[in-house]
Amino acid sequence: MLPTDWLLVVAAVGHATLAALSFARGGKSALARPLALLCCAMFGWCFAGLAHHVTGASYWGWVDDAFTAMSPPLALHLIVSFVGARRGHRRVLAASYLAFGAMGAVALSALVLTTPRAWLASPAWAGLELGAWAPMLAYGLTLLLRHLVTTADPDEKARTRTMLAAVGAGGALATTDLLDAAGGGALPRLGALGTLAATGLVSVSVLRLRLFDRDLSVATAFYVAALAVGAFAAYLIVFFVLGQNAAALAFGAAAVTVVLTAAAREVVLSQTRARARVDQLAALGRISAQMTHDLKNPLAALVGAAQILEGEVSPAQQRELAQLVLAQAQRLRAVVEKFDRVARVEPVRTRVQLNALVTPTAAAQKTAAPGVKVELALASDLPECDADGDLLGGALENLVRNAVEAMPEGGTLRLGTRVDGAAGQAMLVLSVEDTGEGMDARRAERAFEDFFTTKATGSGLGLAFVRRVAVAHGGGVSLTSKVGQGTRVELRLPMAVTRA
């Protein structure tokens, strides 16, 4: 085997290891799935390239071309997820997957059709790949540079610089393969070295810079390391023993891949399910604790009133205790309805004036958190909306509570209302802004997901409830945040329909 082949072996094992680490995170990080899929594509590219060098079989080259075509959109997917711009780039991602997917399909069609084989071996095909890859690489680097400039968090800057280095080095060195193919063999092919460098840099982000927002467990790291060593040994044995027989090599490599994939899948799935159960049970425990806290006081009052009524009391005391029992029963009903609405949002619409909801909330907050300065920017002559005042009030309380908790050392809470949009399409906007800790782009993008929280004592249901309230009223909600600068949430609602 040539030095390039050894590089491909090491790079393939590195990609398999990083893919296993990414799958182990599952849905806990917005980066896990795109990084895992990119690593799988790069593993396929390295493996097909190695098989092509060892056996000389043309079909491995076509498989190599197919994996090469799928790598750019997966890399862009990873980058937009990293900078927290996945929703805003949905159309760009769809177009890139479509275009490069078509190129991959052409490459794979050579396995059964003779027509595309000459084209795939020509410089024109490499020129097409290069022409599509270069602007996408430049666009991805631009997104990362912009993210590096706009973020204020030192840890996020370190992660971004590492990601920039990985994409820049890996992309530049991988481009040499395409330039060489397009120019007819005039340049050294450094793609294997580029993928190895990129894998190492991303691994540093995962293990040392907490790219997945949380440290990986020792058990997971140990398992993945053992898997990597086993994969390295198994593939070396397959290539040394069966390298001269293309059919046997393909079968042996496929068997090793299936066994390793099955082993990784079982352990990763068991860890993911266990972690998901733990997280959801923790969230349910926090909800139960909150419910217990809300029910404790009215229940204590009811028990006290019942104990007094067991003795001799005057008619006046009976009336007073009856009123107390009624008031506490209403408090209990309100608590039950509040938690019921977390899962089921069904607005009972009336005419609601948003300013009338904001003003008392702001007044109460001034006394509840003395270290927080409250500023109001309420639009005059604000139109009404057809909405459920209780649901909107609950959503506003959630937003205000989150804003205050994000400013443990004090800060400024800004509440505002306005009309946004042209006549006929105008929406009412309720905004809540703080000057607190803020969130990075990836956490901000997941903020409205159920059970997602950045607080140790949070349930992950507050902002999810706000989103459901907005959607139930025919509106929407958006969030912008920067680490160290604060967060702004805007709740958009349709105006009330004018009745004739």
Image (spheres, rainbow, N blue to C red):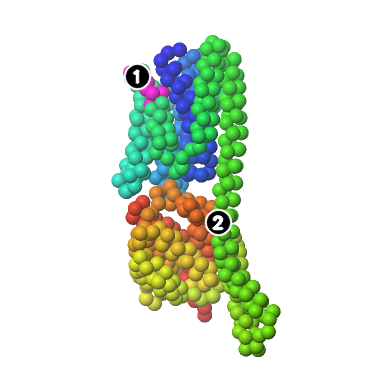
Instruction: Please tell me which residue lies in front, 363 or 196.
Output: 363
Magenta-colored span? 186-194
**Residue at the (61%, 67%) spot, across then down:** 336
Residue bearing the label numbered 2: 286
Q: Is residue 206 above or below residue 397?
A: above
Q: Quadrant of the N terminus?
A: top left
Q: Is residue 425 above or below residue 451?
A: below
Instruction: Please tell me which residue lies in front, 108 or 83.
Output: 83
Asked if residue 119 can be seen in this view, the reply is no
Residue 33 at x, y percent in the picture: 50, 39
Image-quadrant location for residue 177: top left
Image-quadrant location for residue 194: top left
Query: How many tags in the picture?
Result: 2
Q: Amino acid at mark 1?
A: Pro
- Let me know if residue 121 is in the magenta part: no
Q: Amino acid at mark 2?
A: Arg
**Residue at the (37%, 40%) spot, across then down:** 159
